Image: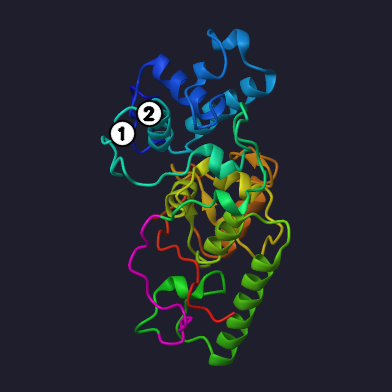
Amino acid sequence: MAKNRDPSQTKWPVTLDHCFARIILDNTVGGGQSQWDKVIKKPAVRHMSGEQLQQAISLGEEIKAGEVDLCRLDEISLQCRGKNVSKYWKSSTTSVHTTREVAGLPKGSTKGPRPDVNHSEGQETVKKPAAKRQSTLDFGLKPDRSPPTLRSGLGSTNNEKPQTQDKDDIEFLKKTLERIQAHPMLTPYRKRLYTALMSVPKGSYTTYAAMSDYLNSSARAVGSGMRNNPFAPDVPCHRVLAANGSIGGFNGEWGKDGKYASKKIELLRSEGVRFDGSGKVVGEPFRKLHSFEDVDR
């Protein structure tokens, strides 16, 4: 796949088997914090636990499916080894969440990321600088000024929608955001994840890679958080697809043959998203994600 530049990844930074092994093992056995052979002895296949083996296999499948950004994983692996990562668009001084931080693993753990593990408040890392943000107070009421994001998940972006309905939409948005912030079991990361999902407009889609880039996390952490979404369908995790335009995951199942794939496609089509004959989405992903920081809650 790497040598043929398979479209599941926008860029293939490595092509050799031992490089893929390094990336996968550093991000699972090493937890994204240390190189794997500082955690277990070589060879890995003889000394890793069954859980670590399964995590490594799963991450390999996610790379193959385009669910995770291989460049980001390679960058984390190189950082674990103290190597120069300047070949990527981020500078070597940019703050990057490790997979350990994103998954909320306790310090000293030798196991890789696990789904739905709570972060502590102290694990919040510095956000990367936010892009220039437009006010989110208009909510589409002033179509000459408001970008599509301001109608996030609230219905059609048709500018002729009655103002009374706009008020209802604003109330729905505010109540959903309040529910997210008030949930006692959510980590700070998951609150940010679900809030960002609300900014994806109906009729649009985004990708795991776009979400992870905005949240400065890994696509794997995005997928894990969405599998445990307590607010679905109000918080629209179905609007997130794989980087290659395929359906991605839904309700814990992955790919177009997954048990719930048809339901995800049905939801997206009902909102106006189109798919080609091969089952891949038509059009560019939505990337103007935001966190409604100007909303008066």
Q: Mark 2 and mark 1 in contact (Cβ < 8 Å)? A: yes
Q: Nearer the viewer, residue 178 or 157?
A: 178
Looking at the rendering, the stretch of residues picked out in magenta corresponds to 128-142
Quarter holding residue 49: top right
Dot 1, how many residues are within 10 Å of its Cα: few (below 14), some (14-19), or many (20+)? some
The residue where tag 1 is placed is: 85
In what element is the residue under mark 2? Answer: helix
Residue 248 visible? The answer is no
Residue plotted at (51% across, 29% down):
27
x and y percent of residue 53 in the render?
Answer: 62, 20
Residue closest to the far left:
87
Residue 147 visible? The answer is yes
Q: Quadrant of the C terminus?
A: bottom right
Dot 2, how many residues are within 10 Å of its Cα: few (below 14), some (14-19), or many (20+)? some
Residue plotted at (62% across, 59% down):
267
x and y percent of residue 289 in the render?
Answer: 44, 62
In-image side of 220 versus 233 (left or right): left
